[in-house]
Image (tube, rainbow, N blue to C red):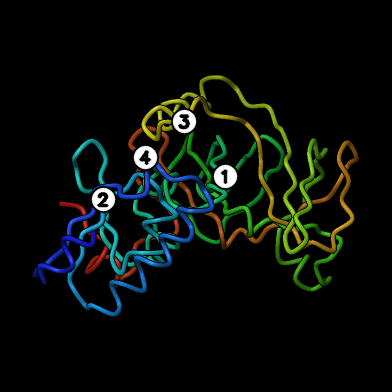
């Protein structure tokens, strides 16, 4: 990096420069690289398999799948509006919950609850429903008015991780093998060991949910994503005009 800087190059190319560092040093070096790039103002192309590096360092991020461009956009747009299952599964930490389900118009059946979507997704049959961990919450701390607008379901929490400023609850669920198969294919593409039928909820740190005890979790259906189980394309929420301009598929 030092040799490249002193040459006053017109552009820098980083090819996974932090891959051999431990976790703490990686975090420190991410900050240093970001400060360096801002100070020099040199166009920089940064190649990485680490989505945290991509999200924290990139002004615009291009997601490749086996050499094929899936989407290029700002980190926030990738996070909030992934165009397909691959992008949704790659961006986010903890990762988006991807849940096997069936849909008929607006009606969606998950392994643990059934409800109506805000709009018809135009599909019938198996789908994958995506929900970010932070969009799941302990129903006990949701105000009554908001709770009525969302969906509440009962679940038995297997593990609770309290980290002070944040807290995670892990809820296992069962699903037919044929519905889980798309998740196994996605896990293989993302270099993960296997797909898990495990719901991760990022709940308020003041929540008193305890492991091994029944709990009531809540979510707003407006925050859900629906993906075609076969093609992986996003069915809902529908594309926005801005996405057709910036969220690219060649």
Residue at which label 3 appears: 192
Query: Residue 48 at what x, y percent from top left?
Result: 31, 48
Q: N-terminal of the two: label 1 or label 3?
A: 1
- Callout 4: SS: loop
**Labelled disc at residue 47:** 2
How far, Cα to Cα, is label 1 from label 3? 14 Å
Residue at which label 1 appears: 97
Query: Residue 133 at what x, y percent from top left?
Result: 62, 53
Using residue 19 as the reference point, say whether residue 126 is left or right of it: right
Q: N-terminal of the two: label 1 or label 4?
A: 1
Q: Disc 1 vs disc 3: Cβ atoms closer than 8 Å?
A: no
Which residue is depicted at the point 57% across and 54% down?
132
Q: N-terminal of the two: label 2 or label 1?
A: 2
Q: Disc 2 vs disc 4: Cβ atoms closer than 8 Å?
A: no
Q: Is residue 11 above or below residue 107?
A: below
- Callout 1: SS: strand
How far, Cα to Cα, is label 1 from label 4? 15 Å
Residue at which label 4 appears: 232
How far, Cα to Cα, is label 2 from label 1? 26 Å
Q: Disc 2 vs disc 1: Cβ atoms closer than 8 Å?
A: no
């Amino acid at each position: 990096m030092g040799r490249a800087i002193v040459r006053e190059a017109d552009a820098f190319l980083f090819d996974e420069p932090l891959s051999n560092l431990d976790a703490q040093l990686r975090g420190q070096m991410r900050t240093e690289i970001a400060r360096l790039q801002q100070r020099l103002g040199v166009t920089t192309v940064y190649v990485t398999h680490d989505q945290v590096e991509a999200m924290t360092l990139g002004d615009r991020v291009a997601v490749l799948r086996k050499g094929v461009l899936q989407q290029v956009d700002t980190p926030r747009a990738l996070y909030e509006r992934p165009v397909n299952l691959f992008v949704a599964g790659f961006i986010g930490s903890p990762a988006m919950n991807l849940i096997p389900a069936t849909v008929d118009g607006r009606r969606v059946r998950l392994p643990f609850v059934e409800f109506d979507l805000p709009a018809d997704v135009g599909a019938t049959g198996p789908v994958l429903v995506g929900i970010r961990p932070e969009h799941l919450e302990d129903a006990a701390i949701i105000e009554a008015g908001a709770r009525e607008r969302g969906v509440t379901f009962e679940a038995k929490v297997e593990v609770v991780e309290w980290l002070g400023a944040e807290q995670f609850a892990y809820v296992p669920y069962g699903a037919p093998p044929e519905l889980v198969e798309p998740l196994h294919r996605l896990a293989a593409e993302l270099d993960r060991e296997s797909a898990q039928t495990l719901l991760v909820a990022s709940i308020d740190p003041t929540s008193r949910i305890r492991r091994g005890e029944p709990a009531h979790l809540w979510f707003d259906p407006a925050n859900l994503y629906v993906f075609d189980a076969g093609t992986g394309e996003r069915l809902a929420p529908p594309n926005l005009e801005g996405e057709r301009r910036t969220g690219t598929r060649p």
